[in-house]
Amino acid sequence: MKGLLIKNGFVYDPLNNIDGEKIDIAIAGGKIVEKVEGAKEIDASGMVVMPGGVDIHSHIVGAKVNTGRLLRPEDHYKDVEPKTAITRSGVGYSIPSTFTTGYRYARMGWTTVMDPAMPPLKAKHTHEELNDTPMIDKGSYPLLGSNWFVLEHLRAKEYEECAAYVAWMMNATKGYAIKIVNPGGLEAWGFGRNVRNIDDPVPNFDITPREIIQGLCKVNTLLNMPHTIHVHTNNLGKPGNYVTALETMKCVENLATDNKPIIHLTHCQFSAFAGEDWRTFRSASEEICKYVNSHSHVTLDLGQIVFTDTTTMTADGPFQFILYQLTGNKWVNNDVEAETSSGIVPFHYKRKSYVHATQWTIGLELALQIMDPWKVFLTTDHPNAGPFTAYPKIIEWLMSRKARDDVMKKISKKARRKTLLTAIDREYTLYEVAIATRAGQAKSLGLRNKGHLGIGADADVAIYDLNPEKKDLAKHPAEIRRAFKSAAYTIKDGEIVVKNGKVVKSVNGKTYWANVKASPSLLEMEPELQKVFEEYYTVKYENYIVPNHYLAAAKPIPVKAKV
Amino acid sequence: MTVTLRLKKEPRLPIDAKCISPDVFAGKSLEEIGKLQLWEGNRQRTLADIFQIEGTCGKTAGEVVIHLFGDLSKVRRVGERMTDGVIKIQGNVGMHLGEEMRGGIITVEGDAGSWTGSAMRGGTIEVKKDAGDYIGGTYRGGTKGMKGGKIVIHGSAGTEVGCYMRKGLIEIHGDVEEFVGIRMKDGTIVVHGSAGERAGAFMTGGKIILCGHMESVLPTFTIDSIKNKAKVEENEIKGPFYLFVGDLAENGDGKLYVSKDRNEQLKDYGELL
């Protein structure tokens, strides 16, 4: 039997409570097994062994990502990867081409990545690009927070019908989770308007964002979805919006059962702004952390800023328009029929800008002040706050106060004076890093075979050339960055795909989607849906649905709904 | 100390030769220089594959003189990011000459391609014949054009000369095509020949001096006055010139000097004053 045996590494596997012990990991048939004989051995002595990285929120594919690529030739021009015998050529810094995206994730030891914003109408495009993204397992969340069908059902409080529609939608778009972006606001944006807070009714629909969030949260529970609702708050990127973020978390507080998370607040850094305007702008990380530390129904991801030239792209059209007005940069904005909107603006985060520097501190303050690492995950909301290739840098900041202080010396003086970071000594351990970058994210996504190295888990493993016994890593932050930047080995489904930061084998990852089985009576709504569809959409019902064969390597997750 | 590079045969495919720069050559032996990597089409080659290399090389970039012979119109990115030293080209040269250069001198006896001196920050580029489009501009989609230094073209240039220019001087003795100084923010462009339509479109600052014929001025420019001369660094160019200010559609404050004598068709503007 062919297989692999990873020997003598320091294993960090938080889901199985393994904290840096020297354990051998056996792999056979693409899975972690108890024992393997006659297998190829990898000597990982003096190295860190972790499950393959998981990214819960990274815009890597889809219509708007591709528009971003077209919008920014200057972004690709300086970052070119020539073709090799194994890999294809590609370009891109903040919005790499699909193949390059896969290779770069694999080089860092990441093996599962979720694209968080798929307008259902653009599902086919999204899956075409996912098919072309090698090396990683992936999935995509359809945008449902401003969908007309959803809004109409929720207004009438028809939760079961809404659940049936969402179940149909997951099947139709081959989506994985419910994504809510600026609930209601995107619908209003189609008419040039927005919603101001979570109790501001959506024009023409007589429903508030609060009802949408609560409704979809109930639907999520009814359907037994693997992930929670994935929420990008209203008022994102505006000073004083932390109140909205808190309200959003509070509004589903009563719906939680068994201390389980039921809402994921994504790129929370952008939702933790205090102050009345940009002059009085300040960090509200303390208020957010206080709430999250005392509640168990919330998970967050960071959306950590890195100081670089990047491209912002969200489904939040009104926010992107504000960003265009702030910067005067080139921009794209779009309304996707009855579903959502989107926008793109290139953006340069500068150290010396008070606002940008404060944003940088907010992300780190959130990560360091939320005591339970299972609640806060590392992302850059790629590419909105920075490209995913900055993860090693962020891990360095989380693990080393020295590294943070070095950056702090160079940022805006006013931001430095006001930040809480100077008073925070906490440094992440490798165990916590493994939670924030893999175990926690896999758990939140409900991917049972990812993010850990227990028997039966997928054999996605990352090995980093980093020796926690030899050196005090916090004192040598550059070591941390070097190690995470290019994994010594990345193993995907039991095969070595990256060795010493070089791709040695190109493999195709699987596309995960939630195959929700709702009761047949709920699915009887299809003829009616078809009829309304004819009125609302510019495409035919039959052409809208993504057929099974469209996915190169589909991995449906069977979900048994409660209704 | 001069290093001479002679093209062995005219390349069929474009060559990406950003290694031809005094900063890269400095302190290397001829053999090491010959081993520098460049791309011909999608194949990686060494400098010695393409060029015959002779001479001696200096220790620092400032001591290096690179002498290129042959028709290099397919050789791109010569002198990219150079900080010092001299490159002399006895013939034509391809696109992106002296891109992002910080200092030093490049002279071209023949034609230069598009994007000559794009995003450059210092130094001098002199082209004895014609040049292509986007001289002293920025790469497509970028917003950061030339920031310093000097470009002199003795022949004519193409469209969008000095797009997104932020500082420095571009002097063109021949003609230019459309959109000279598009989106420029600061700096000076002097054109001694005639200029194409829509000069200074979207400009928000800086100075464009057109000494030759120019059919019409954009309606988003307003006439300010008639000047007898225009200043270019320490020198003066004799007028008289119509001075226009714009581009008002961008709330701009750019100055567009247009020769009065050569442009009879603009005389109505004079009456508005």
Image: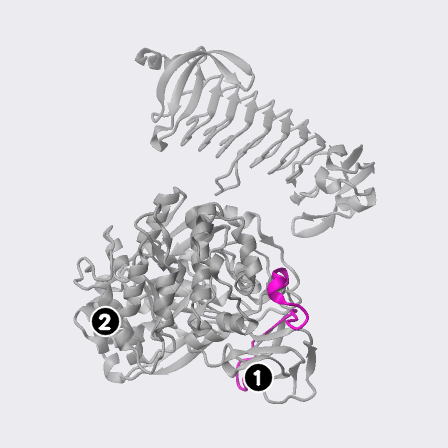
Give the labeled residue for mark 2: A529
> Label 2 lies in what chain?
A
Location of residue A549 (image quadrant): bottom left
Is B187 placed above or below B139 here? above
> Label 1 lies in what chain?
A
Depth check, front residue: A476 or B26: A476
Secondary structure at badge 1 equals strand
Depth check, front residue: A226 or A303: A303
Task: Tell whether position A462 is magenta.
Answer: yes
**Badge 2 amino acid:** Leu
Image point (65%, 44%), residue name: B16
Residues packed near mark 2 inside 10 Å, few (<14), some (14 to 19) or many (20 plus): some
Q: Point out the image quarter for the C terminus of chain A.
A: bottom left
Expressed as whole percent of the image width and height from the top left, the position of residue B108 reads: 67, 29
Give the labeled residue for mark 1: A32
Task: Point out the stretch of residues depicted in magenta.
Answer: A454-479
